[in-house]
Image (cartoon, grey):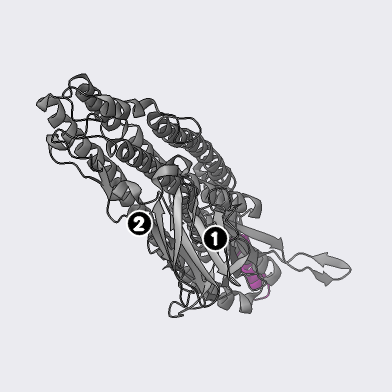
């Protein structure tokens, strides 16, 4: 009798646990990241009696969650790619809106400037025409300043977003490491018994971490995970973790590097800036390097070309008072920005834009290296060496003049940005209509000089046989192409991510119809086991009555 009763009791407990698991599934049907759980049943060990093996009921071996490593890896990969595409598209679109908009871009300002020059050429003695031209000179300089300032604002916004990404990464890493500790503590005693809720929480954190940076996962025997980022750097190892931080580059405080540290208080760390392929953090850096920096350099190239060539022509003329024409535009500061590497112990160079060869100017940064008494110059846009004369400095190359002002004591490195800040530094130098040098003599009606200046609108000597307008349009088109490509990529990544999430939902999500059917099945089994208990009790009572 005890065998029948014992067997029935195992069934009661097993089906009660199965109904409890089903009830938990139903309760968490809308819980984000929850994986459907199942009660695993196994036949209990049999007993050998009188030549037969007698069953002893059922055992609950484990409560497991529906989990597929392949699906989880796909979700993390898709989340990382989506984070990258979303950040890149969001920021690139802002540059596109700025540059392509007639009200906020440079196209209208340049057209108005050259139109004003043509109006003065039509009537060189007209005070209204000269006044309008003075106004347009100022408007053109201010518009260059404004567009450059907007790009600087986008840079600050991008840097702030990078800091947000780094803070999120560190927070998620800490929480994942803490969960590793809890999971390992639970599984050390039970071996195959895993805390499903903690595993779901960790999977959610891993997916959120992947949105910010690309990750790869290694599962440990104790149930913990090691997380590697970028090109294989260990961010989390069991319950220990590294941390990320933003640091200024060695040459420019606006250019941020990503540093990996053993702890937040470490003064030094490993530079891992260029070692990420996806995630929101990678998208921010990709936007900076592929869109923002080139846009600012190209804008500066147009500003330098317009200003220097306009000055060159205007200074050959005579103003209305018989004075030699002055510069139409000025730059404050007049020198090109040169950033000395923090590792330099000494040495300094001075760089200016050369008016005579301004048409050779490139929309690029340069690195000037000094070693063993010799300089080498690298154009960073295409990473090519630029030939320097055997005598070293001073030299004029790519539209800029480089002069050594202090000899380096040892090795030294400098970053030269000839066009990067030009648009923000340009100023109007003419404030009076009388200062416009329309002719090359003081004869009334002489318009030869201002006519030459007006023809600059169609001048094609700046870059690759393109006019100023075409050079700017090339910038607008390039940013527009990047924006369109980013939008297409974002749409594709959203579709891939949604497909991965849907695959997980189909595999690990809670199906209410299925759970209802299971609950009815387990309820019937529970009731049947209850009947076995009742029958065994009746048999036992009959046996007792028979022996009285």
Q: CA distance from mark 1 to mark 2?
A: 82 Å
Going by the image, does 2 lie left or right of 370?
right
Q: Which residues are magenta?
A: 532-548
User: Foreground: 221 or 376?
Assistant: 376
Whether residue 201 appears in magenta in the rendering, the answer is: no
Residue 204's place in the image compared with 176, above or below, is: above
Q: Name the residue: 26% across, 34% down.
A: 317
Mark 2 — residue? 335
**Secondary structure mostly seen in the magenta stretch:** helix
Can you tell which quarter of the image residue 247 is in?
A: bottom left
Q: Sequence order check: which comes first, mark 1 or mark 2?
A: 1
Question: Quick one: quadrant of the N terminus?
Answer: bottom right
Circle 1 sits in a helix, a strand or a loop, which is it? helix
Mark 1 vs mark 2, foreground winner is 2
Above or below, 449 against 243 in this view is above
Q: Which mark is residue 66?
A: none
Judge by depth and name the residue closer to the eye, 11 or 86. 86
Left or right side of 385 for 117: left
Q: Is residue 11 visible?
A: no
| 419 vs 8, nearest the viewer | 419
Residue linked to disc 1: 16
């Amino acid at each position: 009798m005890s065998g029948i009763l014992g067997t029935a009791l195992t069934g009661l407990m097993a089906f009660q646990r199965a109904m409890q698991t089903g009830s938990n599934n139903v309760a968490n049907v809308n819980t984000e990241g929850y994986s459907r759980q199942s009660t695993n049943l196994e036949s209990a060990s049999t007993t050998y009696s009188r030549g037969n093996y007698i069953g002893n009921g059922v055992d609950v071996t484990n409560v497991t969650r529906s989990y597929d490593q392949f699906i989880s890896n796909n979700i993390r990969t898709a989340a990382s790619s989506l984070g990258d595409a979303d950040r890149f598209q969001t920021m690139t679109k802002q540059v596109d809106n700025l540059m392509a908009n007639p009200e906020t871009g440079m196209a209208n300002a340049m057209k108005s400037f050259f139109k004003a020059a043509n109006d003065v050429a039509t009537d060189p003695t007209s005070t209204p025409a000269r006044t309008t031209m003075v106004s347009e000179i100022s408007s053109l300089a201010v518009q260059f300043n404004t567009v450059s300032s907007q790009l600087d604002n986008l840079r600050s916004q991008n840097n702030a977003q990078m800091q947000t990404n780094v803070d999120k990464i560190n927070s998620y890493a800490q929480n994942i490491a803490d969960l590793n500790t809890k999971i390992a503590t639970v599984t050390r005693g039970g071996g195959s018994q895993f805390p499903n809720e903690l595993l779901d929480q960790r999977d959610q954190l891993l997916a959120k971490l992947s949105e910010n940076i690309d990750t790869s996962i290694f599962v440990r025997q104790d149930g913990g995970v090691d997380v590697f980022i970028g090109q294989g750097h260990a961010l989390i190892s069991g319950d220990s973790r590294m941390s990320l931080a933003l640091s200024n580059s060695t040459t420019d405080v606006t250019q941020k590097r990503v540093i990996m540290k053993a702890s937040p208080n470490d003064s030094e760390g490993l530079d891992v800036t260029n070692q990420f392929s996806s995630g929101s953090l990678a998208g921010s850096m990709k936007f900076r390097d592929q869109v923002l920096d080139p846009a600012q350099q190209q804008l500066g190239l147009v500003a330098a070309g317009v200003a220097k060539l306009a000055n060159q022509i205007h200074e050959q003329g005579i103003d209305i008072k018989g004075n030699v024409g002055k510069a139409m535009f000025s730059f404050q500061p007049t020198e090109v920005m040169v950033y000395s590497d923090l590792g330099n112990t000494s040495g300094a160079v001075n760089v200016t834009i050369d008016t005579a060869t301004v048409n050779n100017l490139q929309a690029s940064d340069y690195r000037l290296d000094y070693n063993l008494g010799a300089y080498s110059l690298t154009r960073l846009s295409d990473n090519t060496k630029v030939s320097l004369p055997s005598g070293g400095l001073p030299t004029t190359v790519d539209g800029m003049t480089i002069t050594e002002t202090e000899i380096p004591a040892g090795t030294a490195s400098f970053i030269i940005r000839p066009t990067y800040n030009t648009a923000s530094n340009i100023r109007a130098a003419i404030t009076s209509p009388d200062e416009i040098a329309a002719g090359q003599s003081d004869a009334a009606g002489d318009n030869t000089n201002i006519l030459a200046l007006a023809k600059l609108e169609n001048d094609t000597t700046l870059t690759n046989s393109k006019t100023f307008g075409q050079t700017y349009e090339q910038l607008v088109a390039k940013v527009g192409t990047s924006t369109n490509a980013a939008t297409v990529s974002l749409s594709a990544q959203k579709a891939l991510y949604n497909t991965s999430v849907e695959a997980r939902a189909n595999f690990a999500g809670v199906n209410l119809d299925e759970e209802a059917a299971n609950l009815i099945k387990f309820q019937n089994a529970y009731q049947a086991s209850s009947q076995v208990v009742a029958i065994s009790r009746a048999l036992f009572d009959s046996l007792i009555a028979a022996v009285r």
